[in-house]
Image (cartoon, rainbow, N blue to C red):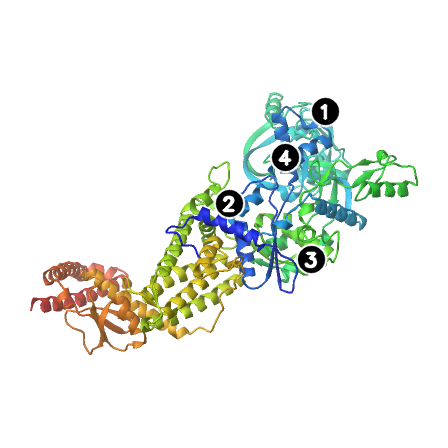
Amino acid sequence: MEEIASKYNPAEVEEKWYAYWLKNGYFKSKPDGREPYTVVIPPPNVTGVLHMGHMLNNTIQDILVRRARMTGKNACWVPGTDHASIATEAKVVNKLASEGIKKTDLTRDEFLKHAWEWTDTHGGIILKQLRKLGASCDWDRTAFTMDEKRSESVLKVFADLYNKGMIYRGVRMVNWDPKALTALSDEEVVYKEEHSKLYYLRYRIEGGEGKYIVVATTRPETILGDSAVCVNPNDERYGFLKGKKVIVPLVNRAVPIIMDDYVDIEFGTGCLKVTPAHDVNDYMLGEKYNLPTIDVFNDNGTISEAGGLYVGMDRFDVRKQIAEDLEKAGLMEKIEDYNNKVGYSERTNVVIEPKLSMQWFLKMSDLAKPALEAVVNDDIRFFPAKYKNTYKYWMENIKDWCISRQLWWGHRIPAYYLPGGGYVVAVNDEDAVKAAREKTGNKDLQLSDLRQDEDCLDTWFSSWLWPISLFDGINNPGNEEMRYYYPTSDLVTGPDIIFFWVARMIMAGYEYEKDKPFKNVYFTGIVRDKLGRKMSKSLGNSPDPLELIDKYGADGVRMGMMLSAPAGNDILFDDALCEQGRNFNNKIWNAFRLVKGWTVDSSLQQPESAATAVRWFDAMLSRTAEEVADLFGKYRLSEALMAVYKLFWDEFSSWYLEMVKPGYQQPIDKETYEETLRFFDALLRLLHPFMPFITEELWQHISPRKEGESIMVALVPEVKPVDGQLITDFEKTKEIISGVRTIRLQKNIPNKEPLILQVVGKHDSGNDAVIVKLANLSAIETVSEKEATAASFLVGTTEYAVPLGNNIDVETELKKLEDELKYLQGFLKSVKAKLANERFVNNAPAQVVENERKKQADAESKIKSLEEGIAILKK
């Protein structure tokens, strides 16, 4: 066995053992007779790079997966990436623009060639980076949401849901992203509080000889699409307007007054402008009163020909210009400051436009019912459970899902339009031609006669199938892997995608497998900096995870992340946590080097102090193993790590090793040495899921290992019955040792000088051998009264005293006691003066007066003790 290095070198150790794990196939999983433990990775964007959120999420997954292997389960962690339609297409468009190429100049096939080139170049970088972290994924199973199996699955599901009548096509009001030029789902809109303006506009009454009504709006540019003005029929102020028309300012279009109790009499002026093409509520009013729909915006947010004015101008430029023009025309009543919430695209961070658009939708109400029940009934458990309410609210108020996107990168919608109108849905061109011939009765129809829908599917329409499609459950229902690995065990994800992804996977699971897709969902928090700000590139407060690993080692970073990561709570990340992790690595390393440096003498008898230490630490180890198992069951991973950390740092290093350590250049007995290595082995196994690299390195050094052996598949320490009284008694033993050590410090007595410990009262002598060794005592004596010069301390009700004898410098001690006496006498004088003041005693609260009297009694008691001590020293 090679010699262990004097210093821990993370980079060297990490590279060596990751290659070893891969070579020996420890990450691979195939169905067998063991209990499966399955985790599917939340697929990161294919062209993304590792950030702190990924670090946290994948560290947690790896901890769970490694722990599962060490409890004898067949752990299968499936990696993969997401094609990320909007994000990836935007990157490809930007790259092309930098080369002077516009997307509009390319055919769909030409553009997709560029997109696949981009994906092939940048795709998978993030998965390679996860290896640096120690992620123990079954890399042979790596999937991509647009690979052949996953693509086939998506198209089959679309066709199936369409045939079931659950997918439909229609013109609806959608959230439009003017930058990405696509519709978004409601969940992809982020509402931000903004300081806006409220514009009060004058609408002249047709034939009203200069009379007008005032309408308030935050978006004066949309008057270009006004079809009506609505007032509440119960609003007495506007009863005279019934049957009349008003003139839209600047546009000079006469529009009807409609009366509907939808309008809030108390809000604004009580008059509502109705723009059916640009507001979802206005659209409903338009449908109800058969109003014309005038779409004044182009897809990119500029004014269209239908607007009539300001054609081609950007919507926000128009807002400024139209306000000026309204002022000049005398049609602006006033402008007020106004706070409102504005919807932004989560993907491009531009203000979304409500827009009427022909889109594909999936009916959600029936899909949602079993998915809601599963979580409410805890068939699927959420950690922390507080997210059940969030989930329940959304599922009970669910809307149909807009699943089409006006993009080319993604799964193209498998709908084919017929020459004479109508369409067919089919999973491939061949089936489309068959279906078209059947529908039209034209046996000569060819593929060239059909036109496939230009849109692609929302990215989430592929990832909602992830736990099923990874095991090819759509294409090959009931296959061996689906029967074995599904439902998966744990899902680790952020609460920000509880609707995008978690809820939808649950719906797909019940629709296609009649079963939940996973048993537990662990929601991570958001990684923030130490000031509480969300980490982002724009703020420059997000460290590069790979640089952190280079600096502190992967184990140090993993530990730093987990020390601050309770489930569901935000993580206040600080590099100092990684430093703490690195220091712990060094502590483990140095402790191991200390033990392996001892010389073993087989002829030596085990000392009583060592035998006591072994019994005690065996109990501590078993208690912690039990605690860790319980905490893993509750997904309290940070607390589980802290329990092992304290066991190693406080109990093993600070106490156990001190108890069994042989004297300088002395050998250790064989029995104690072997027990110590057994403990080290168990500690490394407890730590392995959290800190895989250093634990493997040291485990391999404990005793000769065969090629291919690994701590990865060593079982976690056995939980044995714990002697609680032994642990309780030992806590008192530690207090006694600490008490003696404190006296040594206070009295400046060298550690090498043996002391006598006097016991006044009840004392259990069972651990005396340990006390004698660690406190360096020549004897422990039970006495009825301590020596006059002794320094003492209490443990419970028992007094322990160290006779100082020659160990005391009388002059120094006398001066110290006299100084303390002088201070207390001055203090007592001030307290007495306060209590002698009648105004204070009569007017101060009773509790305050009582506190002063207690101070007097304490001071008088201490003064008496000091005076006795001084008298003894002066003899």
Verify CB contact (< 8 Å) between mark 4 and mark 2.
Answer: no
Q: Is residue 756 visible?
A: yes
**Rendering quarter of residue 793:** bottom left
Q: Is residue 167 left or right of residue 802?
A: right
Q: Nearer the viewer, mark 2 or mark 1?
A: 2
Q: Residue 535 placed where, x, y %?
A: 49, 42
Question: Is disc 1 placed on a helix, strand or loop?
Answer: helix
Question: Residue at image x 43%, y 54%?
Answer: 2
Which mark is first along the chain, 2 or 4?
2
Question: Residue at image x 49%, y 68%?
Answer: 718
Q: Give, as a three-letter code, the residue at label 2.
A: Met
- For the image shown, how many numbered marks are present on the structure? 4
Give the residue pinned by disc 1: 305
Instruction: Tell me the distance, in whole angstroms, between the alpha carbons under discs 1 and 4.
Output: 37 Å
Question: Is disc 3 placed on a helix, strand or loop?
Answer: helix
Which mark is first along the chain, 1 or 3?
1
Q: Residue 375 placed where, x, y %?
A: 63, 59
Instruction: Tell me the distance, in whole angstroms, between the alpha carbons under discs 3 and 1.
Output: 57 Å
Question: Residue at image x 67%, y 36%?
Answer: 116
Q: Is residue 639 visible?
A: no
Q: Which mark is residue 52?
A: 2
Instruction: Tell me the distance, in whole angstroms, between the alpha carbons under discs 3 and 2.
Output: 33 Å
Give the residue pinned by disc 4: 118
Quarter of the picture holding the C terminus: bottom left
Quarter of the picture holding the N terminus: bottom left
Which mark is first along the chain, 4 or 3?
4
Which mark is first along the chain, 1 or 2?
2
Give the residue pinned by disc 3: 481
**Crowding near pointer 4: few (<14 within 10 Å), some, many (20+)?**
some
